Amino acid sequence: MDRSGVIDGIRRGARAIAIAFVASTLIPVVLGLLLSVPIGRVFSLIISTLLLQANAAFAGVGLGLNPVFILAVMISVELGIVLAIYEILDAFAEQSERVRRFTKSTEEKMERYPILHKYGAVTLIILPMLPVIGLYSSVVIGWLLRWNKFQSIFFVTLGWVLVTGFLLLVALGFVQLIF
């Protein structure tokens, strides 16, 4: 790897960290300050979202936070992480010949299935809801299958909003789950 490649990799890594920090931490903290939410509770919700993903809705309700605030923070954290993951994956693709070959091979295989290539990103609505796959893996799947980045982000976020909203309703007692 040449020197400019290393510098570009560092630049892309720093950009990913900056994106994640601004969207996942700075925006929720500013929102919490504007709404007079204790910073400790904001950070607890941020960390819960990073660790528990959509199940952090239960933590937010347990912290006594407003459901709209919980949803706003969880969406902000989700977008920060999704954008940062895309940035990191793109950096790997630029830096690694092996990853470039793999993505090129995937693109060639996807060309054989034009409907999947065109509409496959819609399936990303469901993936954040699946416990095994969840948010982080759904981003990687969309990237690996070379689906349109903006569509993938939109559908991952839509799935995230749906599952988080549903779990908020469960946490608030509006929906009863029978097990």
Image (tube, rainbow, N blue to C red):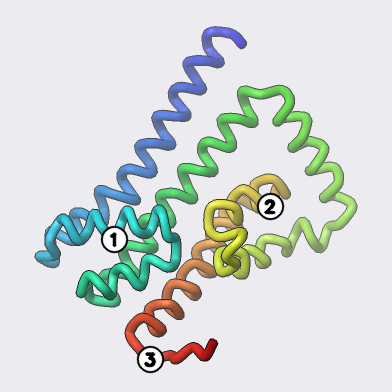
The residues tagged by marks 1 and 3 sit, at their Cα atoms, a distance apart of: 21 Å
The answer to whether residue 117 of the structure is visible from this angle is yes
Q: Give how far across and how far down residue 147 sits, in percent.
A: 69, 52
Pointer 1: residues within 10 angstroms few (<14), some, or many (20+)? many
- According to the picture, the residue beneath numbered tag 2 turns out to be 147
The residues tagged by marks 2 and 1 sit, at their Cα atoms, a distance apart of: 31 Å
The residues tagged by marks 2 and 3 sit, at their Cα atoms, a distance apart of: 36 Å
Q: Is residue 121 above or below residue 67?
A: above
Pointer 3: residues within 10 angstroms few (<14), some, or many (20+)? few
Tag 1 or tag 2, which sits nearer the N-term? 1
Q: Is residue 122 left or right of residue 167?
A: right
Provide the secondary structure element on which disc 1 rests.
helix
Residues at badges 2 and 3 in contact (C-beta under 8 Å)?
no
- The residue type indicated by label 2 comes to Trp
- According to the picture, the residue beneath numbered tag 1 turns out to be 45
Provide the secondary structure element on which disc 2 rests.
loop
Nearer the camera: disc 2 or disc 1: 1
Query: Measuring 51% from the left and 22% from the top, which residue is drawn there?
Result: 9
Q: How many marks?
A: 3
Q: Is residue 100 left or right of residue 36?
A: right
The answer to whether residue 155 of the structure is visible from this angle is no
- According to the picture, the residue beneath numbered tag 3 turns out to be 174
Q: Quadrant of the N terminus?
A: top right
- The residue type indicated by label 3 comes to Phe
Query: Measuring 14% from the left and 65% from the top, which residue is drawn there?
Result: 37
Q: Give how far across and how far down residue 30 sits, in percent.
A: 18, 55
Q: Quadrant of the C terminus?
A: bottom right
